[in-house]
Image (cartoon, helix red, strand yellow):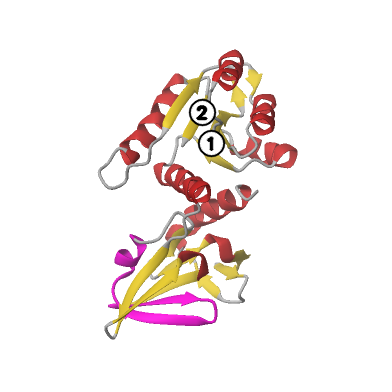
Amino acid sequence: MKILICDSDNNAILSLVKIIRSKYSEAGKFIEILIDTAHNYDETLSAMNMTDTPYDIVFIDIVLGSESGIPLAMIAKNRFRDARIIFDCADARLCELVYVEMQPYAFVNKPFNAEIIYHHIETVYDIINGVDRTLELCSNRVKYNIDLKRITFVESDRNKVTVHFGNESLTVISTLKEIEKSLNGNFIKCHKSFIVNLAYIAGVEQGDFVLSTGERVPISRSRTTQSRHEFMMYIGGIN
């Protein structure tokens, strides 16, 4: 996977590189990632002109020094057809304006949230490699492998966890924490007893996520801000 990071703030570049390297150089989590960096318009354009292989992800600051990063993002989108453009910005209000104009793959706020960065990298990696992940569960000595894309939400009750998928559900002896380890970045914990698949959320109503299936998943007060933020980031990232 090849990534280009364009930001006039060198500390932001170093932070993002550190986040990426610290995760994907670990044993068992290795993904070969090549990272190029640029600090201004000319350096970014030069990196795009000189690269031998297309970029898979381009992180670019909406405000690149005294210039706008939007024209460069448009060049990147036209030149690297399959590249995912991810804008980063310290001012969330700018994201709304850019989304209307360009509809990029995603936005990330500064300071960077490592888990959101990992979510986007792993999602793009899976798309590139055609990976379909599954959740392996065991009930009554029978093993089940459930496609993560089918799972709508997961709920726990003491030492039991129920996984909902399609019109079916499966209850196993486990904990929400254990199940969460096997899920990907499309899932968020919105309540101490619930994990929801962002892909199935149709909206937010009266403190609940309303799913496209008609089901409702509660959002705890302590997780309201983060859950809503991750949902908005997700829908902003859909092509």
Compared to residue 107, the image places residue 164 above or below, namely below
In percent of width and height, residue 60 lies at 57, 29
Compared to residue 238, the image places residue 134 above or below, namely below
> Is disc 2 in contact with disc 1, using a CB cutoff of under 8 Å?
yes
The answer to whether residue 107 shows anywhere in this view is yes
Q: Quadrant of residue 107?
A: top right
In percent of width and height, residue 195 lies at 43, 66
Compared to residue 81, the image places residue 226 above or below, namely below
Q: Which residue is mark 1?
A: 57
Q: Nearer the viewer, residue 115 or 58?
A: 58
In percent of width and height, residue 185 lies at 45, 54
Indicate left or right for 95 with 111 as reference.
right
Which sits earlier in the primary sequence, circle 2 or circle 1?
A: 2
In percent of width and height, residue 126 lies at 48, 50
Indicate left or right for 228 with 76 as reference.
left
Residue at the location (28% across, 74% down)? 174
Under mark 2, the amino acid is: Leu
Residue at the location (50% across, 27% down)? 5
Dot 1: within a 10 Å radius of its alpha carbon, few (fewer than 14), some, or many (20 or more) residues? many
The answer to whether residue 89 shows anywhere in this view is no
Residue at the location (37% across, 81% down)? 171
In magenta segment, residue 223: no
**Extreme-right residue of the structure:** 101
Under mark 1, the amino acid is: Ile
**Extreme-top residue of the structure:** 42
Q: Which residue is mark 2?
A: 4
Q: Quadrant of residue 177?
A: bottom left
Residue at the location (45% across, 37% down)? 112
Residue range in magenta is 159-181
Spatial separation of the CA atoms under disc 2 and disc 1: 6 Å
Secondary element at tag 2: strand
